[in-house]
Image (cartoon, rainbow, N blue to C red):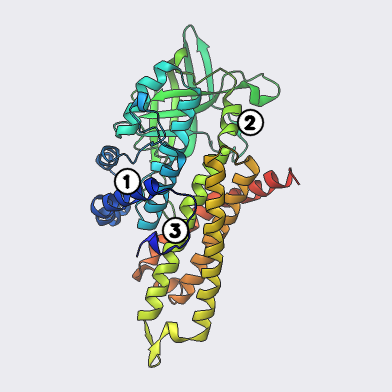
Amino acid sequence: MTLDTVAGRQAYTEDHEAFRQTVRSFLAKEGQPFADQWNKDRLVPKSFWRQAGEVGMLCPTVPEAYGGLGLDFGYNAIVDEEMAYAGVPAGFSLQSDIVAGYIEHYGSEEQKAQWLPKMVSGDVVTAIAMTEPGTGSDLQSIRTSAKKDGNHYVINGSKTYITNGQNTDLTLVVAKTDPDAQPAYKGMSIILVESDREGFRKGRKLDKIGQDAADTSELFFDDVRVPITNCLGEEGKGFVYLMSQLPQERLSIAVSVQATAQKAFDETVAFTKDRKAFKGTVFDFQNTKFVLADLKAKLQVGWAHLDWCIKRHLAGVLTNEEGAAAKLFHTELEWEVMDKCLQLHGGAGYMNEYPIARAWRAARVSRIYGGTNEIMKEVIARKL
């Protein structure tokens, strides 16, 4: 089974599709055979990042001047789709779709030259640290501080739910550089923190209900000193920078969950046709056919909408509200597909016996992470 069964894609060129074959072959050889072990270990080894870098899967939009391929977001989306469909749990999308964009758009020449080539090669794994215990989605309430001391910042605070937190070599830390600023968002900055800085500590690998190998961690900062030059862009502009990249971040999630939903559907069609029941198969039941027909129709609509979003983003016109709508729609669709497909497998009691298990657990995480969907609705409603 592959995503080639999805007909009528309109977002990609022949070059995109040629790249897809490279990605797919790499994942089949270097990713899928080891995914179960990585989930048991609750960590993807850094060697896999370097292997992916060698075939051009990391940060394809980075300009050639900084070691990248200088391609468009469509190549990122290809990687996201194929990794989600293959069930390979590395946090590449965070590095390629989010962190690279911040450094490309707002980093100094020195920061770009220092970090982007290593991100492309996989020699450096990155994270972005926003969420804190107790702050939830209210970024303006963060307490992590970065106080000036001569030509350094001194950072104190803690972060949680940080993707790539165990593997990270470089973390973009959202901190208050001016705690008295009004409104509060004007006092927020993004500071680059290398993992070998004294006072920086990685906490627990957090237990989750899915995506076990995609490490999610606590991070702690105890009088961490970094040069003033580690500030990304202008001091006090951190919140503005975060908001400006939201359409791509939300689209990235939509791409991955649509592919995961398709994989669950494909696995379920194969399972119901193979599973014997009452001198026939589960697929022979009228209810099974109706459920699968309903899901197939919704997935078809989902792919059409996703391609529309990707094309608009490639043209530079995807809005914040459209990105929010994509994240809302596709995470909800993924959950509906997973839930109904699980029932056709016989329910949760038998889930771990079937390939759908990993995708179902991943969907639960996506929907809870997409539990910010109430926020997505607020974003969309503001433009009504």
Is 11 placed above or below 95 here?
below
Number of numbered discs present?
3
How far apart, in angstroms, are the residues tagged by discs 2 and 3? 33 Å
Where residue 67 appears, as percent x and y from the top left, is 33, 27
* Element assignment for label 2: helix
Between tags 2 and 3, which lies in front?
3
* Element assignment for label 1: loop
Lower sequence index among marks 2 and 3 = 2
Residue of label 3: 260
Quarter of the N terminus within the rendering:
bottom left
Mark drawn on residue 43: 1
- In the image, 112 versus 311, the foreground residue is 311
Question: Most extreme residue toward the bottom, as rendered?
Answer: 279
Question: Most extreme residue toward the right, as rendered?
Answer: 384
- In the image, 172 versus 327, the foreground residue is 327
Where residue 116 appears, as percent x and y from the top left, is 37, 27
Amino acid on which disc 3 is placed: Thr
Question: Most extreme residue toward the top, as rendered?
Answer: 150
Residue of label 2: 140
Lower sequence index among marks 3 and 1 = 1
